[in-house]
Amino acid sequence: MARDKAFLAGIFRKGIERGHSEKILEELSELTRSAGGMVAGTLTAHIERPTSNLFITRGKLEEIRSKTTAVKANLVIFNVDLSPVQARNIEAALGVRVVDRTGLIIDIFARRAQSRAGRLQVELAQLNYLLPRLVGRGVIMSRTGGGIGTRGPGEQKLEVDRRKIRERIGRVQKELVKLRSHQRLLRKQRKRKAFSVAAIVGYTNAGKSTLVNALTQSRIFVEDKLFATLDPTTRILEVPGSHGILLTDTVGFLVDLPHSLIEAFQATLDEVIEADCLIHVLDVSNAAYQDQHRAVLRVLEELGVHGKPSVLVLNKVDRLDELQMERASNAFPEGILISAKERLHLDRLIQAVQRMMTQEVNIR
Ligand SMILES: Nc1nc2c(ncn2[C@@H]2O[C@H](COP(=O)(O)OP(=O)(O)OP(=O)(O)O)[C@@H](O)[C@H]2O)c(=O)[nH]1
Ligand SMILES: [Mg+2]
């Protein structure tokens, strides 16, 4: 199948800072590439408030249509979430597939899911997303036959019959309940063996998997794309004088992570919720690292785990000069500067994790 050629429509409220909208559009490009698409063109528009039937004005829509045609894009990706009605109307006006932000993220997840739990969770998110959007969408979806926004978990074809979708949602939910209780059992067994568990959390692409690999001599898949990791993986970090600490690498977070996705991914997020403590990895070489730090704290809060003991890791310092390094450590004095890739200062991090664990055990 040919690679999707996407036109990106960045729609922002009037008055938003230019630097901010640029960062959001840059991240949308990253997401598009992570979904296997290429960016053929972009447009930025500012609106007072979205309209219920089109989100944007007819004039803007016409501008998107002519630019999309000019660059021969076969789909348009919006940085916002569209209601089913808006998406349908926009698609009819543009004549090409339309994907919104949540649809794009679900699509990346669908490409990444490998474990049984991962696939079921993606399927649940997809079915819930699809159900209200089916009316009138069949034509464009079947005509394109694949590509961003049409992929099922593991490249299965997406079901288009509403009754069957509802039945399937019920079955998937039941299976997930079973899987979660099985996983809970496994975690209890680990606890009985007196292992402490640290969940590695952080923004997507921060270097979480690279860090787990560096600390435990493992080979978890690492890639310079968003959401390289979807399924949780646990490895043992050997530390002198203890049974070792279990490190759980898991899915990364994103700014404005859609709530529906957080809901569908409960089985995965249980790993974070039930960990003894957190290792928060922040990519301080990314221009948006302060925003990313905030976004992660927000998700942790939503999960109800912001009070857990945690260590903040300022990663990718090999990319920084002296001044930038000083800035990062001034911004986060409690943070530990490391490079997971170059294995720089990992000993300091291990000491900090050990300290946190000892305190944690004393509290327990
Ligand atoms: N320069 C530099 N690059 C790094 C460092 N740590 C990770 N990277 C790179 O950053 C990219 C993302 O790394 P991953 O380990 O996959 O990041 P992640 O946080 O697991 O990402 P997701 O699973 O996608 O959420 C890869 O290209 C890594 O090689 C580092 O310390 N320095
Ligand atoms: Mg990863």
Image: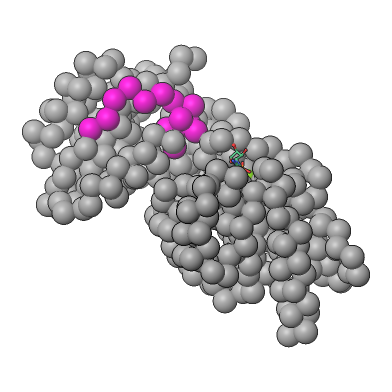
Q: Nearer the viewer, residue 99 or 255?
A: 255
Tell how many labels: 0
Residue farthest along the front direction in this orientation: 322
Q: Image quadrant of residue 201?
A: bottom right
Looking at the image, which residue is at 72% across and 47% down? 343
Q: Nearer the viewer, residue 130 or 315?
A: 315
Looking at the image, which residue is at 45% across and 18% down? 3
Is residue 215 found left or right of 222 in the rendered image? Answer: right
Q: Residue 277 in the image: x percent, y percent? A: 68, 69
Q: Quadrant of ligand 2?
A: top right
User: In the image, is residue 108 above or below residue 38?
Assistant: below
Q: Image quadrant of residue 77?
A: top left
User: In the image, is residue 301 above or below residue 180?
Assistant: below
Q: Residue 80 in the image: x percent, y percent? A: 30, 45
Residue range corresponding to the magenta coloring: 31-43
Q: Is residue 175 visible?
A: no
Looking at the image, which residue is at 71% across and 55% down? 345
User: In the image, is residue 4 above or below residue 42?
Assistant: above
Q: Is residue 3 visible?
A: yes
Looking at the image, which residue is at 8% across and 33% down? 59
